[in-house]
Image (tube, rainbow, N blue to C red):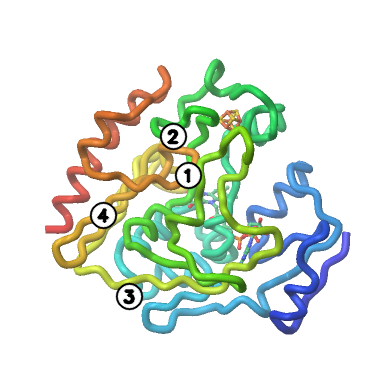
Amino acid sequence: MRLVQPESLEAAEAALGNGSRALAGGTELVPLLRSRLVEADTLVDVRGVVPRGVNGTTIGAGTTLAELERDPEIPAALREACTLAASPQLRSMGTIGGNLLQATRCWYWRLNYPCFLHGGSECHAREGAHREHAIFGNEHCASAHPSDPAAALLALGATLRTDRRELPVADLYRLPTEDDRDVTSLEPGELILELEVPRPDASTYLKAMERNRFSFALVGVAAARTGGETRLALAGVAPIPWLLDGPDELERATPLPGTAYKVDLARPLVRRALEALG
Ligand SMILES: Cc1cc2nc3c(=O)[nH]c(=O)nc-3n(C[C@H](O)[C@H](O)[C@H](O)COP(=O)(O)OP(=O)(O)OC[C@H]3O[C@@H](n4cnc5c(N)ncnc54)[C@H](O)[C@@H]3O)c2cc1C
Ligand code: SF4
């Protein structure tokens, strides 16, 4: 495997595609390469070309979660989501761009079962163990999206700038279908460069976990209020970060037998998040 360290965005773009992969902090990509869930002949280290740091409402995609959790200018929902994610070591290496593109933690997928998301015909979690899985959007794949910051950015109404276009964070994600098993709309070789995160009047992120630290969300709830509008988004409840119409949508959830408890977890978290907005 080759490692290239381009010095310009143009050089990075030229090196991407055709069996190469972008490498940022490597906290997600390296384990996936090691388990052969991702194949690459070339790794393109994008840390020298993807912006890093915070400038007003603009966040470089190369900014680490640790940098975001420390910055008082960052809206509370995103700061708290970063603080509650992973471990201090992982947050020091892991970037916000890489976090948004992390793969599912579903163990069937991680153990390379030939499941729907891997291109097969069935979801093994549906019949098998699925306590951590989805309560929404689980018709084909019942995985639960693991990113806390993605839910926060969704509630905050953030947008992304890539090297090809601008798009709302909501449009980065798509439910997998028979024709396309991908859960993001990013094109091969497309680089996330920056995020534009509006400043809300108030925001918060609450997370239910197996333990209080270093645990993926069973349910994460982000809430943000701007003017008269309040937006809610959930982590850990669907194959993609889930924008919730309102508390009532929880009553229309489609849990599996083993995930019904997540609806009961989400109700008080949503209520507490809305109370926290004042
Ligand atoms: C044990 C463990 C626990 C964790 N717990 C949590 C948790 O509780 N909550 C949570 O939200 N996350 C959690 N994470 C995920 C962690 O936050 C991510 O692994 C990290 O943020 C990924 O960032 P990275 O820079 O290391 O990405 P990398 O590993 O370098 O890349 C990840 C993916 O993104 C792509 N990529 C990276 N940067 C760009 C870019 N700018 N443009 C386009 N593509 C890009 C890569 O090609 C790769 O496919 C956990 C991870 C681990 C290993
Ligand atoms: S939940 Fe998704 S990733 Fe897990 S086994 Fe089912 S199809 Fe595969």
Direction left: furthest residue? 278
Q: Which residue is mark 4?
A: 231
Q: Which residue is mark 1?
A: 240
Where ligand 1 lies, by quadrant? bottom right
What type is the residue that disc 2 sits on?
A: Gly
Q: Answer left or right for 25 relative to 254.
A: right
- Of the image marks 4 and 1, the number of the one nearer the N terminus: 4
Q: Which residue is mark 3?
A: 72
Q: Which residue is mark 2?
A: 137
Residue toward you, 167 or 51: 167
Question: What SS does tag 4 mark?
Answer: strand
- Of the image marks 4 and 2, the number of the one nearer the N terminus: 2
Q: In the displayed structure, would residue 8 be above or below residue 199?
A: below
- Of the image marks 4 and 3, the number of the one nearer the N terminus: 3
- Alpha carbon distance from label 4 to label 2: 19 Å
**Residue 57 appears at what percent x and percent y?**
37, 78
Is label 1 in contact with label 3 (beta carbons under 8 Å)?
A: no
- Alpha carbon distance from label 4 to label 3: 21 Å
- Of the image marks 2 and 3, the number of the one nearer the N terminus: 3
